[in-house]
Image (cartoon, rainbow, N blue to C red):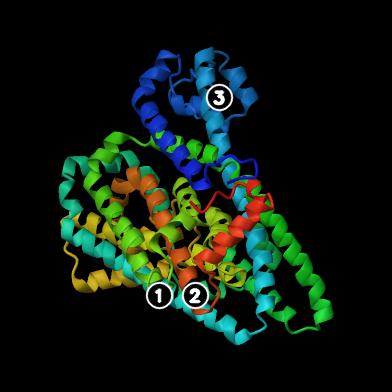
Amino acid sequence: MATSGKTRLALHWKILIGLVLGVVVGVVINQVWTEATWHALGVDEPASYIATGRAHVPQGVDLSSLTRDQIAEQYPNAGAGAAAACARLGRQFNGFVGDLFLRGLKFIAVPIVLFSLIVGASSLNDLSRLGRIGLKTIGIYLCTTALAITIGLVFANVFRPGSFVNQETRESLVAQFGAEATGKIAAAKSPDVWSTVLNIVPTNPFEALAKGEMLQVVFAALLVGICLTLIPKEKAGVVIAVCDAMNDVVIKIVDLVLMLAPFAVFALIVKVVADMGLNVLGALAVYSLVVVAGLATMMFVVYPAVFVPVAKVRYGRFFRAMSPAQLLAFSSASSSATLPVTMECAQERLGVHEEVASFVLPIGATVNMDGTALYQGVAAVFIAQMYGMHLGWGDQLTIVLTATLASIGTAGVPGVGMIMLVIVLQSVGIPLEGIAVILGVDRILDMCRTSVNVTGDCMVCAVVAHSEGALESEESVRRRSASREAMGMDEQPRGGMG
């Protein structure tokens, strides 16, 4: 109960409502607002019009190479009517809301990792414990990633989704998404273990902060936190106090940003569903269902099989606590952008101590890609089946090892799974052009696998915290939540315990 005496809807319910409404509105727009609708409003090239505001441009003209003044001078009759202008404005405003929210989360991600990890590491006063936490974290992450790929391979071999795509559909999809696939292939680089490890150490820590290189930020923050324990307390205390205060400031910014979350989720989902061709989804329905079934198995069966007996966290407690982060991960398709919310959910709602959450979760946002890895397994076997290729046990073991290595150090941003897939396909000689076939549904599957990635991060965080005696009991979290409400702090949009 809030101090006003009114029952306030929990944050995860607000986000879920925004997500459902976004799907409904997106489907309606996808079906009703077609290119014919734009043509009826006097717009010849919808994509160019949305980008430039010019509706009538001779075929073959590239407006991106011209300035706004040049467009107005060379094509004075390129404007559209008021109805088209309103539709364009609505689309731009919808995109603005979603982008503003994502920028807010990215704005917070680096500071919250930096300050919380400095405070957490400096408070441990035990380097052996820090090393122990690190080994547990990396070890569990690697094991769950390999397990996820294996589950994906099993699902793909059992249900054989590639056999449901005929040659005509394959060629049509390759023609439609071939250019985009070429860009993904060009961006892929084979994993280099030595370079990946070396890249953890920044040559310029300020550049790492500016570019949001999360593993480098974690390394720098850990180094500062450890060294604070090695200098006199009267000197270290000042720095720790400043970082602690700044961490509280960043947490308050998280609260403010989350006020926009339900509206931003609606905006992000509307755009994805409206732009996604349902005909493409239909052509790849079996493939999509196999991927989603594998991800659901990982999230709702495998993870609980670990955190319930090992971390002693009830099934309902875990998912209630982490639901805001899971829903935001689904909407943004970025585990890095979701990181501030993931950390707050783990600490405030699940009860993980700050020194563990601030270490385990940032590493997980970069290293742990369980959902993406599972998707690699299904996608690789799907493309092989589609081209009539047989993958032996040796090939599938190669997929497991390559995808596990490729996931380490890969940025947790939208679409990165497709670049990782190029590396996996190259390792076993599967035709890379098959990527074009699955690009049409990649965005929606990217959202699903990002939710699994974030859930996996939280599962490992809970397990490591429990093993270190750094996980509060459910009753303790509930008492703290009630205390916050009694003090009037529940006005912040954290949501309730459910």
In space, the residues marked 2 and 3 are separated at their CA atoms by 50 Å
Secondary structure under the numbered disc 3 in the rendered image: helix
**Quick check: can you spot residue 293?**
yes
Secondary structure under the numbered disc 1 in the rendered image: loop
Residue 128, position as x, y percentages in the image: 59, 87
Q: Is residue 39 above or below residue 389?
A: above
**Quick check: can you spot residue 203?**
no
Marks 2 and 1 close (CB-CB < 8 Å) = yes
| Residue 276: mark | none
6 on left or right of 415:
right
- Name the residue furthest bottom: 128
Q: In percent of the image, x 46 and y 73: which residue is there?
A: 463
Q: Which residue is mark 1?
A: 310
- In primary-sequence order, the first of circles 2 and 1 is 1
Q: In percent of the image, x 43 and y 34: which residue is there?
A: 21
Marks 3 and 1 close (CB-CB < 8 Å) = no
Marks 2 and 3 close (CB-CB < 8 Å) = no
166 on left or right of 331:
left
Q: In percent of the image, x 72 and y 56: which residue is there?
A: 249
- In primary-sequence order, the first of circles 2 and 3 is 3
The crowding category of the residue bearing disc 1, from other C-alpha atoms within 10 Å (few below 14, some 14 to 19, many at least 20), is some
Residue 227, position as x, y percentages in the image: 72, 80
| Residue 89: mark | 3
Residue 430, position as x, y percentages in the image: 26, 60
Residue 349, position as x, y percentages in the image: 54, 59
